[in-house]
């Protein structure tokens, strides 16, 4: 006898087989078109972009990820430099840039200036000329110098790039043109650098840069600054500590290491180089918000230490 249920079952199986085959072919076509950007992927992407709204941002960055514009900043007149004006060329990596846990701004209006691109802006975190978009302590340093009556005005000219080895700052490095450009823009505007501040070394500790190599590369940078007419004292921080894999840092830190030995030796290596702030010793664990970058307390300590040093150093 013929089973009356056999025909519907066979038909269902055929339909299922056809459906699976169609899905498999569609998958192969989709994979091919996705990999080689063939039809219909370009069409689908165009349709998707029509309904996708990009979040607006107030910030613009250059190829080094340096902050070059901020919609909330407006240029102001560049003040004339006098013998009571501090012009600070600030260089280094993330702890010299905009990665701090606290934002600061000028408490003295246009008496603390962020100089960038030949223009002047009232100093406020994040500073143009450095990467990152959070906090920095150079604006607070300007406030402290004015509060103490050490100067009448502070011009901050930062060049700071996260994770930058000292080799990138030498004449053959990719950051060096930005340094030269900044110095020349200062000169064109009528500014003479009065102090150069260097806060860098964490990445060189991580990658194992040797003492002699670090010292020689930094001296190449100093020689280049001198050739550009920067005659100011150059202050070298003792800075090498950055913990945490997410920061590109290490699990532990040895205070006496080739980088810090090089940094300590530099004031004796060439005229015009002086000891800067020792951030490795100055800051405790709670002064870093992520075991590497300065928290608000760390920024305040470092700003005060720089103010103490610069106010008392002719």
Image: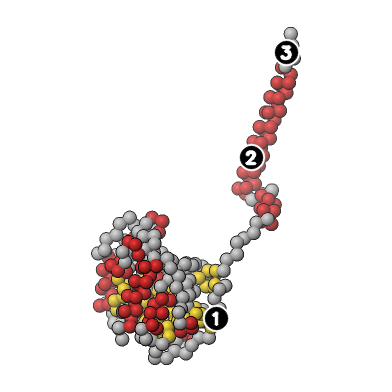
As drawn, is 157 to the left or to the right of 17?
Answer: left
- Residue 16 vertical position relative to residue 259 in the rendered view, above or below: above
Dot 3 or dot 1: first in sequence order is 3
Q: Which residue is mark 1?
A: 75
- Residue 28 vertical position relative to residue 305 in the rendered view, above or below: above
SS of the residue under disc 1: strand
Residue 27: which disc? 2
Residue 295: which disc? none
> In this orientation, which residue lies closer to the viewer: 51 or 13?
51
Give the foreground label among 2 and 3: 3
Separation of disc 2 and disc 3 at Cα? 37 Å
SS of the residue under disc 3: loop
Q: How many marks?
A: 3
Q: Which residue is mark 3?
A: 3
Is any atom of residue 242 visible in this view? Answer: no
Instruction: Name the quadrant of the N terminus.
Output: top right
């Amino acid at each position: 006898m013929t089973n009356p249920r056999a025909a519907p079952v066979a038909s269902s199986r055929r339909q299922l087989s056809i459906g699976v085959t169609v899905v498999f072919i569609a998958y192969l076509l989709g994979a091919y078109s996705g990999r080689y950007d063939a039809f219909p992927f370009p069409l689908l992407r165009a349709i998707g972009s029509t309904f996708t709204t990009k979040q607006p941002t107030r910030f613009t960055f250059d190829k080094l990820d340096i902050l070059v514009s901020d919609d909330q900043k407006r240029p102001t007149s560049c003040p004339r430099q006098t013998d009571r004006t501090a012009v600070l060329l600030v260089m280094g990596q993330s702890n010299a840039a905009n990665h701090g846990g606290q934002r600061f701004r000028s408490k003295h209006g246009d008496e603390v200036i962020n100089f960038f691109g030949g223009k002047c802006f009232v100093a406020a975190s994040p500073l143009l000329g450095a990467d990152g978009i959070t906090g920095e302590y150079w604006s607070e340093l300007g406030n402290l110098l004015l509060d103490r009556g050490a100067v009448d005005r502070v011009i901050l000219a930062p060049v700071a790039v996260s994770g930058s080895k000292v080799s990138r700052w030498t004449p053959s490095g990719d950051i060096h043109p930005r340094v030269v450009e900044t110095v020349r823009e200062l000169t064109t505007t009528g500014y003479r650098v009065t102090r150069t501040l260097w806060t860098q070394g964490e990445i060189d500790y991580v990658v194992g840069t040797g003492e002699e190599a670090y010292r020689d590369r930094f001296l190449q940078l100093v020689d280049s600054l001198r050739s550009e007419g920067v005659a100011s004292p150059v202050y070298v921080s003792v800075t090498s500590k950055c913990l945490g894999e997410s920061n590109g840092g290490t699990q532990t830190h040895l205070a006496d290491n080739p980088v810090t030995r090089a940094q300590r030796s530099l004031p004796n290596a060439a005229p015009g180089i002086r000891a800067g702030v020792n951030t490795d010793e100055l800051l405790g664990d709670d002064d870093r918000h992520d075991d590497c970058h300065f928290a608000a307390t760390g920024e305040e300590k470092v700003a005060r230490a720089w103010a103490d040093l610069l106010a008392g150093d002719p």
